[in-house]
Amino acid sequence: MTTGALWLTAIVLLGSCVQWLTGMGFALVAVPALILLLGPTQGVVLANCASGVICAIGLAHGWREVRWAAMVPLAVASACTVPLGAWTTRHLPEPVLLLVMGSLVTVAVLLIVRGLRAPALRGRAGAVGTGAVGGFMNAAAGVGGPPVSLYALNAGWTVREFVPNAQFYGFFVNVFSVAANGVPRLGGVQWVCVGVAMTAGMLIGRALADRTPDRRARALVLVLALGGGVTTLLKGALEL
């Protein structure tokens, strides 16, 4: 196995494990590393595919707890902005795209840490607004979860309430994003590595879920995501 395949396995394994621990986080943790390893376009579409599969598996167990009145407008709004995000990924020069992706991840993490609260993030209007922003971010940078996290924070949802709704949103926004961006162009060995890593990450994450406090898991996601976002931003700046 090549060094690149080993790195790919490690990144997907970590992202999958975090996703099962917290209900989201695959993209935040994995996207910065994937775009540095595979390039912006392939890194994003791989994150869309992997995150969508993980969300689908999780949603199969938690769909009864989805808050349809909030999540359907949010998902529809995300579908409307995915094409703009896909266009951005295809047309920006790679250094600029790295800057945009790194900035989006970094700002998103800082807003979550800050716990931004605003009337505009509540109710039906908040669902539509966060869905639209999330759809663009997911297709452009593979990271569509932070706006939904801010919506859930302002709606006063608990972690238990948030997880199935995040999985519902993650499944649909990633389906839209894959439809717009296509599937990643990986070799056979790479696909095997991704499949094995996702399965192992799921098993490890589920085993650790009951033993890891929510606050500690959330802090791990944010630290990893912030480090990756800043690294990507700096790489883009240096390549300009």
Image (cartoon, grey):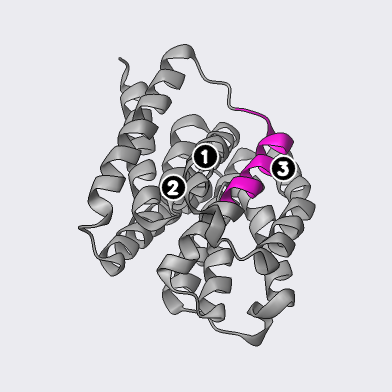
Determine the image quadrant of residue 10.
top left
**Quadrant of the image for the N terminus?**
top left
Determine whether the residue tagged by mark 2 lies in a helix, strand or loop.
helix
Instruction: Report the magenta residues as a range.
Output: 170-183
Q: Is residue 70 above or below residue 20?
A: below
Question: Horizontally, is 218 left or right of 106 in the view?
Answer: left
Marks 3 and 1, how far apart at CA = 14 Å
Mark 1 or mark 2, which is nearer the start of the sequence? 2
- Does residue 194 appear anywhere in the picture? yes
**Quadrant of the image for the C terminus?**
top right
Q: Whole-percent x and y of residue 85?
A: 71, 48
Mark 2 or mark 3, which is nearer the start of the sequence? 2
Marks 2 and 1, how far apart at CA = 8 Å
Q: Amino acid at mark 1?
A: Ala
- Residue for badge 3: 86
- Residue for badge 2: 26
Q: Whole-percent x and y of residue 96?
A: 62, 47
Identity of the residue drawn at 55% across and 46% down? 98
| Circles 3 and 2: CB atoms closer than 8 Å | no
Q: Whole-percent x and y of residue 159?
A: 41, 68
Q: Is residue 230 magenta?
A: no
